[in-house]
Amino acid sequence: MVAATAVPRPGDAARPMTSAEKRVIFASSLGTVFEWYDFYLYGSLAAIIGAQFFSAYPPATRDIFALLAFAAGFIVRPFGALVFGRVGDLVGRKYTFLVTILIMGLSTFIVGILPNAETIGIAAPIILIVLRLAQGLALGGEYGGAATYVAEHAPNGRRGFYTSWIQTTATLGLFLSLLVILATRSFTGEEAFKAWGWRIPFLVSVLLLGISVWIRLQLSESPAFKKMKEEGTTSKAPLTEAFGQWKNARIALIALFGLVAGQGVVWYTGQFYALFFLQSILKVDGYTANLLIAWSLLLGTGFFVFFGWLSDKIGRKPIILAGCAIAAASFFPLFHGLTSVANPALERAIDQVKVTVVADPKECGNLFNPVGTRVFSAPCDLARDFLSKSSVKYATEAGPAGQPTVVKVNDTAVPFPAGSPAADFNKAATAALQAAGYPKANDAGIVKMSNPFDIFRPQVASVIGLLFVLVLFVTMVYGPIAAMLVELFPTRIRYTSMSLPYHIGNGWFGGLLPATAFAMVAQTGDIYYGLWYPIVIAVATVIIGLFLVPETKDRDIYADADADAPAPRR
């Protein structure tokens, strides 16, 4: 066994960055920003893409298929982690995340030139879904490679700070995608953007791809992996060693449930569910909602680096778990605050208007519909589905057997007899709700921005302030997570081991959060009920993390590069 001191390492103590280390961080971070930019473009433009590639179906079905195609990218991320993690531990970090960025960039560019369904028929949505799957697989391999590569160049005592720059990339990628979309919309006009302008942000990605590939080609392999490669001590079967041996699989499970699951739901609640809540529940127009989120991200992004730096001083574990705990305790008051400020008329209506669905219990089914594919036919289900999508707080009351469904809005009864058109009921219910105090979709009291710099009005500033607090929680849990995951696993299987729990936690627990949370809202008639999903998972993460997750900030990740088959230290 070679002595630990034989491993060429960036340094044994905290010190200023060298120019080479700055180049490593810049190249890794920039490429990852572009990958996230590519990934989020689709999510931001899902409605338009649905109209372009699923035009053979009714509007509601188009949106469902578009969202399912978006979700597919999240679902396959763990499989990308397995595929590219294995390659990264066998071949090397540099070449693996060079391949991932090529796959992501080319897939995004092809979406921009892909003919729509009216031109090539069913081939269009099939190719689109294949491209989305390729993006998800590539992203599953990108993050682990970038985080591992940067961490293995970082000196001891500075890994939290170094890897925190990687942690800014998801937010910066989302921010960049929003900016490009807003700029293109302003340049082309809304009608032209829907017709052809939406392709421009996808086509622009080829320029970003070229820059990223050129920069990454200038990099060399990480010192720890290069040393292992030269001495022939790399893992011959990374997947088997990482997940087939209990000593390593146990650490992966602890990392998932004691760190990443909570981090994932806090992150997706603070950014993506907040955006969904503004648009779908508070009825804020899409332009304004995207600007509000963009400003909160701009104000909060620097805290990723701050909390990464702080984790080098006080530890990763206390910051991540504190972020989960504080977020879980704050989500209800913060989202109540968003309603109060962004749509005060809705808040008053929820407090003052009593809405009850009275129906035969046998006619009321389960509305849980996280992927949006179910079609409801019973009047009770149609009525409740309509009310939830209208952001109405309602209760369900059992009526006599065989009695037609009736929705009571205070003292006004709106019947929904079996066989009657849903459109007639929706129209009558809307009139009753608005008469009782529920706002219209374009109510003057709903927060609205006319330009990106319209941020000094008290209502706009207040909403941005609340969103900033949510982003601050994101930075607490996400800033130190890369360093901690890197430090949990030995060099031989680090890429594979850290990538899988990360992408299950973020791709599944986090990525499916908006749809699952809204399904919970629809089932209960409470616009805040969906928050229980991230709260329960965050609290569970805090409990598991407190008892099972070790602190890792003082570990020497270079020492295990000299061992033939090291076990993770606890």
Image (cartoon, rainbow, N blue to C red):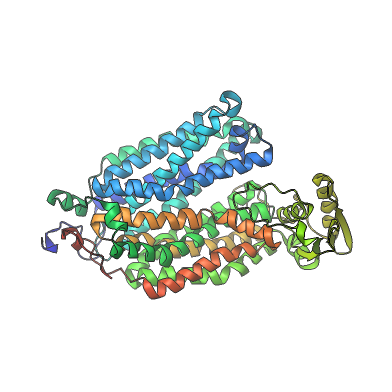
Residue 473 in the image: x percent, y percent? 49, 65
Residue 158, can we see it? no
Residue shown at 61% from the left, 68% from the top: 332
Residue placed at 46% from the left, 50% from the top?
A: 172
Residue located 66% across and 66% down the image: 336
Q: Tell me the quadrant of the picture where the C terminus can be found.
A: bottom left
Judged left or right of residue 535, residue 570 is left
Of the pair 137 and 472, the residue shown nearer to us: 137
Place of residue 70 in the rendered image (x, y in percent of width and height, measured from the top left)? 53, 44
- In this rendered view, identify the residue nearer to me: 161 or 568: 568
Does the image show residue 341? yes
Q: Is residue 536 left or right of residue 96?
A: right
Query: How many labels sit on residues?
Result: 0
Percent from the top left, x then y, of residue 59?
68, 38
- Taking the spot 23% from the left edge, 55% from the top edge, the residue there is 492
Residue 259 percent location from the top left of the image: 41, 65
Which quarter of the rendered picture does the N terminus lie within? Answer: bottom left
80 relative position to 181: left or right: left
Furthest toward the bottom, the residue is 547
